[in-house]
Image: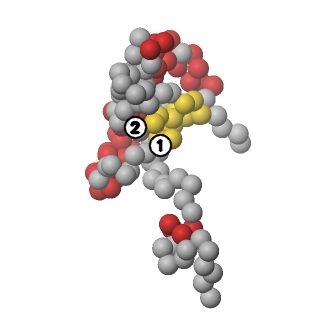
Amino acid sequence: MTQFGWLSPVAGHAGSGFQPIVMYQEEHILPQALPHFDSVWIADHFYGFDAEKTEGFLEGWVTLTWLAAKFPNVQLCHHVLGHGYRNPALTAKMASTQCVKYPSSSSATISGGAVSESVVNPTRSPNKTLA
């Protein structure tokens, strides 16, 4: 079965008056759109991409929890999970707590993204074949 997800940015830019886009969507778009989507995806970034860092920017885990309370019938996911700057044990605890509170709408995945085999298997370099 085909499923569709909605990506909701936690950043705000000059065009939105620096209001995080997910806040606008939560009020004006998601109540009508989410019955047609299976999931909402949030990025777990600390700050945005503008040079001055003037963007309005929400924290990813808190935003997912807020959306879980507001929209309990949709799957919630991170499309980027900043595990490079989060303690793994704390991240696991945060995910398990969210899954206990919102079991039908929580999902947690930790991935290295597009990682080469040499990173997954440090004994193998990209130009070396193991016998």
- Point out residue 44 in the picture as x, y percentages from the top left corner: 41, 39
Q: Nearer the viewer, residue 45 or 69?
A: 45
Q: Is residue 21 left or right of residue 5?
A: left
Q: Earlier along the polypeptide chain: callout 1 or callout 2?
A: 2
Type of the residue with mark 2: His
Q: Secondary structure at mark 2?
A: loop
Mark-to-mark CA distance, 1 and 2: 8 Å
Q: Is residue 116 visible?
A: yes
Residue furthest bottom in the image: 131
Task: Determine the residue located farthest toward the front in the rendered image.
Answer: 51
Task: Kindly indicate the quadrant of the structure image that contains residue 7.
Answer: top right
Q: Residues within 10 Å of mark 1 (few under 14, many from 20)?
A: some
SS at badge 1? strand
Position of residue 1 measured from the top left corner of the image (x, y, whole percent):
71, 42
Q: Are the two marked residues, 1 and 2, in contact with CB atoms closer than 8 angstroms?
A: yes
Write down the residue under mark 2. 45
Note whether 6 is above or below 17 in the view shown.
below
Left-right relation of 37 to 14: right
Question: Where in the figure is residue 53, as x and y percent of width and height?
Answer: 35, 26
Instruction: Kindly identify the residue that appears in the image at 36 percent across and 41 percent down.
Output: 98
Q: Nearer the viewer, residue 97 or 108?
A: 108
Q: Disc 1 marks which amino acid?
A: Val
